Image (spheres, coloured by chain):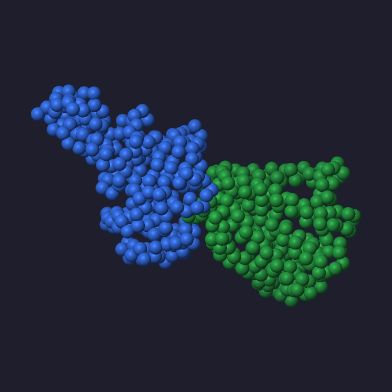
């Protein structure tokens, strides 16, 4: 097994991208609005705090890890050229994604707790702090649970990206494009249908809502149990990891 | 002693069969020529052997162990192919160090010599290489990585005559310095005929010849003389091709001659591998095989 070598190769390649993501985020949240305010003559009403409050570092990192996880074919080509098995690639990619999530999640929470919350006077900066923070009153325990939940959300996002990306690599470019066009349209129609049904109250008491409540740990209008979501994310993550392993095993060089 | 074994391998794309029940055994420290016309299935076979694509049936093993999803066996092979699997944006020196990381070694001394001989700039990006230098770079990797099976698919693609000369001479030097198995897949038979020890001819996905070159050439017979005498002498023999020059007829026989008497008017000699290849790949449609 050459998991260590492949992990080193992939990590070295992907780590600098995190820096690029955060620099881009700073440019989009602070520099660009500042320049627009300067050009439009509204600099007097420009507030860095308002800009920071509006930008979600966790969401951007989540988007990054999702997108980067969908892209695996280029690495597969290089690794299979160098006699690396699909199993080793899968294990190394999982390890690297885990390391990237560890780094990103740590940064996101440190940024949230030590920088964003104090300067915006608002303790809510991610899903946990908005919804689950009141379940325990111990701030250290909340911090640990926040780290676990945020990390698991990123893990599931990454695995979802790996499933989608690896599923697409099984097809030719033409079929991939068709899936990328038809998939979102079908998904949109389904979502519209569900939304309409919910508005009509036909869906309100259905199993979907009950299931969502169970997954989210809903215990009343203001009370949510974080362990319900953590366990749900763990189960979902294991299922996705299984699907990803299967799809990695089906990877092969394409003829196009 | 390492053996690479291809056992009952078949491959189909939809209803089209590109490899049909191929069985091969590559022994250690030999230089094989895998010959076939365009579309014969050479690249598909090599891709299956290195687990880049899946066979529809059959198995590839090294030392009786399947290569499928097996790092220790896949790491014994290097396939240099026409398809580019390296990142276009990477510098050549970076690709070398990444490949060294994966294979656990690299002959830098030989690489430096080859880099100088071929005059390749290792600071270039892979995607910017011309076809010739693209092949040269991959050949350098193939010769310098510590593998037991060096598989070269169309190795001299885009190389000029001088660079081809350098390559063939360096291949032989590298082989004598560090004997290992080479598999050269090409349709440029004349150029490799003097290098290879064994020849495998693949036609329409089937192996139609698999023998040591020496044995193959010993069984090639060009029978030249007056048409009637030649026809009479070669009657019942395996005539794979013929030429006519006026009244003179040349019949090309592949196989052993029996002890029939050679007429004084008829001359007998051997013919080359290229001619045999052309005759066999024109003649056979999977009917007659010359395998060991």
Asked whether, in this view, residue B287 is left or right of residue B230, the answer is: right
At 84% across and 46% down in the image, what residue appears?
A210
Q: Quadrant of the N terminus of chain A?
A: bottom right
Q: Identify whether B239 is placed above or below A93.
A: above
- Colour-to-chain, green: A
Residue placed most toward the observer, A238 or A61: A238
Mark yes or no: residue A54 visible.
yes
Residue placed most toward the observer, A74 or A125: A74
Asked whether, in this view, residue B102 is left or right of residue A114, the answer is: left
At 71% across and 63% down in the image, what residue appears?
A58
Residue placed most toward the observer, B37 or B21: B21
At 59% across and 65% down in the image, what residue appears?
A15
In the image, residue B212 lies at what x, y percent? 30, 41
Residue placed most toward the observer, A119 or A243: A243
In the image, residue B229 lies at what x, y percent? 14, 25
At 33% across and 45% down in the image, what residue appears?
B33
In the image, residue B119 lies at what x, y percent? 33, 64
- Colour-to-chain, blue: B
């Amino acid at each position: 097994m050459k998991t260590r070598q492949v992990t080193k190769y992939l990590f070295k390649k992907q780590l600098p991208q995190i820096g690029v993501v955060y620099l881009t985020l700073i440019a989009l949240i602070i520099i660009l609005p500042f320049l627009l305010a300067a050009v439009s003559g509204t600099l007097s009403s420009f507030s860095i705090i308002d800009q920071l409050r509006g930008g979600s570092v966790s969401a951007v990192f989540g988007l990054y890890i999702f997108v980067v996880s969908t892209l695996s074919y280029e690495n597969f080509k290089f690794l299979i050229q160098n006699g690396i098995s699909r199993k080793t690639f899968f294990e190394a990619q999982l390890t690297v994604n885990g390391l990237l999530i560890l780094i990103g999640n740590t940064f996101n929470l440190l940024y949230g707790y030590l920088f964003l919350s104090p300067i915006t006077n608002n303790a809510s900066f991610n899903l946990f702090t908005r919804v689950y923070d009141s379940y325990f009153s111990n701030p250290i325990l909340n911090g640990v649970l926040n780290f676990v939940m945020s990390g698991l959300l990123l893990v599931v996002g990454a695995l979802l990206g790996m499933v989608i990306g690896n599923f697409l690599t099984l097809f030719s470019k033409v079929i991939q494009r068709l899936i990328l066009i038809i998939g979102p349209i079908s998904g949109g129609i389904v979502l519209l249908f569900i939304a309409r049904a919910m508005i009509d109250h036909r869906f309100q008491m259905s199993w979907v809502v009950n299931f969502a409540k169970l997954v989210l740990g809903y215990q009343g209008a203001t009370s949510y149990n974080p362990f319900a979501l953590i366990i749900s994310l763990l189960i979902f993550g294991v299922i996705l990891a299984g699907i990803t392993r299967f799809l990695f095993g089906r990877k092969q060089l394409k003829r196009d | 002693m390492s053996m690479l074994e291809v056992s009952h391998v078949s491959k189909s794309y939809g209803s089209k069969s590109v490899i049909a029940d191929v069985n091969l055994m590559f022994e250690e420290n030999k230089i094989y020529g895998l010959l076939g016309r365009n579309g014969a299935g050479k690249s598909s076979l090599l891709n299956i052997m290195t687990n880049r694509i899946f066979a529809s049936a059959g198995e590839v093993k090294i030392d009786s162990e399947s290569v499928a999803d097996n790092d220790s066996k896949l790491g014994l092979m290097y396939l240099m192919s026409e398809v580019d699997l390296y990142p276009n944006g990477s510098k050549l020196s970076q690709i070398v160090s990444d490949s060294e990381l994966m294979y656990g070694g690299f002959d830098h001394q030989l690489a430096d010599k080859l880099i100088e001989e071929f005059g390749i700039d290792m600071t270039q990006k892979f995607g910017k290489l011309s076809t010739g230098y693209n092949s040269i770079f991959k050949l350098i990797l193939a010769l310098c990585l510590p593998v037991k099976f060096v598989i070269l698919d169309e190795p001299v693609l885009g190389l000029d005559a001088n660079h081809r000369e350098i390559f063939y001479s360096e291949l032989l030097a590298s082989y004598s310095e560090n004997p290992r198995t080479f598999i050269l897949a090409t349709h440029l038979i004349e150029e490799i005929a003097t290098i290879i020890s064994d020849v495998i001819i693949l036609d329409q996905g089937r192996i139609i010849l698999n023998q040591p070159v020496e044995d193959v050439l010993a069984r090639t017979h060009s029978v030249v003389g007056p048409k009637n005498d030649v026809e009479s002498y070669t009657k019942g023999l395996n005539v794979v091709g013929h030429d006519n020059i006026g009244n003179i007829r040349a019949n090309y026989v592949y196989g052993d001659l029996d002890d029939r008497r050679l007429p004084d008017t008829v001359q007998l000699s051997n013919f080359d591998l290229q001619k045999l290849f052309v005759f066999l790949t024109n003649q056979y449609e999977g009917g007659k095989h010359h395998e060991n």
